[in-house]
Each structure stands twice: as C-alpha cells, then as structure tokens.
Image (cartoon, rainbow, N blue to C red):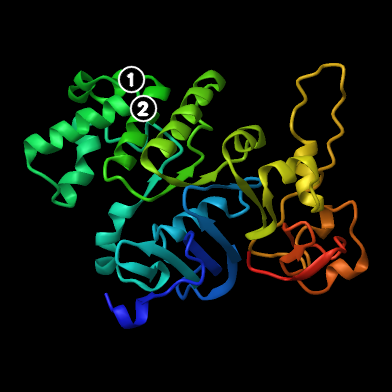
Amino acid sequence: MSDKTQITNSPTPESLLEVNALCKYFPVKSKGFRRKQIGLVKASDNVSFTLMNGETLGLVGESGCGKTTTGRSILRGITPTAGEVRFRSERGWVDLAKLSERELRPLRTEMQMIFQDPFSSLNPRMTVGDIVGEPLLIHGIGNKTERTQKVMAMLEKVGLKPEHRTRYPHAFSGGQRQRIGIARALILHPKLVVCDEAVSALDVSVQAQVINLLQDLQKDLGLTYIFIAHDLSVVKHICDRIAVMYAGRIVELATSKELFANPQHPYTKALLSAVPNPDPDQPMNMDLSGEVADPGNLPAGCAFHPRCSMGIDACKGAVPPLTEQTDGRTVACIRCGNGKNESRT
C-alpha cells in the first residue's frame, strides 16, 4: 500500500467513510462470437455521502435501484468503475476504490457485511464454531484455544449458547442462523458493517429481535452501520439518516425524522404512500405507478420523470444535481425550489 497515494488527511475528523461520485457500470454485450459492448447498466451512478462514526445510514428504494451494488462497491466486494471510497482505517485515511486485493486484505478486519439470506450465506458443511471462527483463522489471530474462546464469547453476545458451536446451520431457525451470520461479521470487531437486507428474510417478530440486537451491539462495540433495506418501517426504527435511491442515484438524503415527517422528493413521497397503513379505516393513497426505470436504458433527464406526478418538460433535460436545501437535507429535484447550493453531503 502506498502511503503517498492512498493515505491522506480528512477534512471531516468525525467521519468514518466518505463516498464521492461512486459509480459501478456493468457492460452489456451483444450475442454471438465477437460479443461487442453495446451499452452499460449504470447500477450505481455518482453516489456521494459521508458516514459519521457510530451512525446508521439507511439505503432504501425499490428492487434494482442500486442499494446492494453500492454497499458491495464500498466494501470492494466488487470493484467500482469510478469514484472515491475514503475510509478511516487504523493507519489513516485510505481510498478503498484504488487498492489492490493484496492491499485490501489487512483492512478486511475493519469492515464486514451481514448478508440477506441467513442460510445460503453459511456453509452447511461447517460447524457454527468453524463458521464464526473462520475470519480469525484467515487473519491469523490467536491460537486454536484463543479462537475457541473468542467464538464462544461472540455467540453469547449475539444471543446463542456456547455449546451451539458444535452444531451445523441446518439445526437452527432462520433468526438463529442470522445471529450466526452477525457473529461471524463481528468476530473481528470491525468499525464499519454493511447490513444488506439483514432482516428481510425473517418473520416480523424475529425481525424486531434482530434489529434490537443490532442496536445493542452498535452501542456495546461502537459500530457504524450502512443499513440496506426496502422496508421503510424497519429503516425508520434503526437509522439516523436515510438515503433514498432511484435508478442508481441518491435522490434524497435526510435525517430519519425529517424524511418521514416531511418528504421532499416525489419518489420519496411515493414510497411512503406505498407503506401499508395498519388502520383498516384509513384507505391507502398510493402515488407510485409505472415501471422501474431500466438502468441499461435510462430516460433523458431525471430518471423518475416518467412516473412522477409533478413532472414537467424541464425534467426531461439535464439530470438534476443533489442540492442542499435550507433545512439541511439534500434533494435531486428541480421542483424543490429552496435549494442553497449543490452539495455532496
């Protein structure tokens, strides 16, 4: 790793992660022998935000909006096409987007992911003890006895019993399997954890238990979360700030309280209108119709304008920038007229 090119001083001392103009494009190739590139799928396009220490930032939107691609690009599960991912490591600030696999390896202890499916993400041929202890083994941390002790302590911390370490994943319920996944992600005591739809595959009652567990672990271990989800009620409960994504871009970013109390972007309003109302006497007024924009063939201008109830001809022009509003939030919409200046938040 080159200190001269990769490690710098940060202008925001309280931040842990600074994402600037992150892009991930997937090539579309023609059929046949030559397989020429004929287009691009812009899964993540010009995504920018800052994540503070100890904060939980939610990434929400419809399926295919680029949430998971953004999370995996940040952790370098996939290599970004362009942009910066500046992370405050133990050595200083590093740009994760520019590091090689060899340079990334020692940083893996500081950032981890909790996956969506609690069954397919666990090796059915390994015991729970081996699954949770594998990161320790890979990074050469401790001897066998020390690793076993760490695994037992972590299993207890996530609500499982130490004796569970000798069992296999099929012997556990969905909620218990997700706790195993959480234990594996936290065994190295990372700073940053990306929760990729971490509760969407669980029953509602189990979701609440896992969310409460994640919040308790955040306080105990000083964790910072990026929480990817499509269930707005879950996001409202756990997140400090929420970034709404559509067609690979962030269209609104605000605190959880502000976003739910007074959404600004038409897409945010439409998403909130689609949340089921528990009161049977209150009819739903869903304001979201049409098809999700094709990231491989986006409409000109604002990608949401074909589905937008507030759309005008000017929306078909240039892509609206993410602009800071007078209340501190950022919105990418020309119809939100109280902007102060363009901001990367």
Extreme residue toward the bottom, this view: 4
- Residue at (42%, 41%) from the top-left corner? 115
Disc 1 is placed on an element classified as loop
Q: Is residue 265 left or right of residue 309?
A: left
Can you say whether 149 is above or below 278 in the image?
below
Residue 7, given in percent of the width and then of the height, sits at: 36, 75
Earlier along the polypeptide chain: callout 1 or callout 2?
1
Quadrant for residue 322, please give it. bottom right
* CB contact under 8 Å: marks 1 and 2: yes
Residue 129, given in percent of the width and then of the height, sits at: 19, 31
Viewer-closest of 336 and 99: 336
Can you say whether 106 is above or below 62 in the image?
below
**Which residue is identified by label 1?**
172
- Residue at (39%, 74%) from the top-left corner? 98
Extreme residue toward the front, this view: 13
Is residue 127 visible to us here?
no
Give the alpha-carbon distance from disc 1 to disc 2, as whole Å: 6 Å
Quadrant for residue 39, please give it. bottom right
Q: Which mark is residue 177?
A: 2
Quadrant, the C terminus = bottom right
Disc 2 is placed on an element classified as helix
- Residue at (35%, 38%) from the top-left corner? 121
Check disc 2 and give the amino acid type.
Arg
Residue 51, given in percent of the width and then of the height, sits at: 52, 56
Q: Is residue 323 left or right of residue 41?
A: right
Label 2 environment density (alpha carbons within 10 Å; few <14, some 14–19, many ≥20)? many
Is residue 86 visible to us here?
yes
Viewer-closest of 186 and 27: 186
Quadrant, the N terminus = bottom left
Check disc 1 and give the amino acid type.
Phe
Can you say whether 55 is above or below 122 in the image?
below
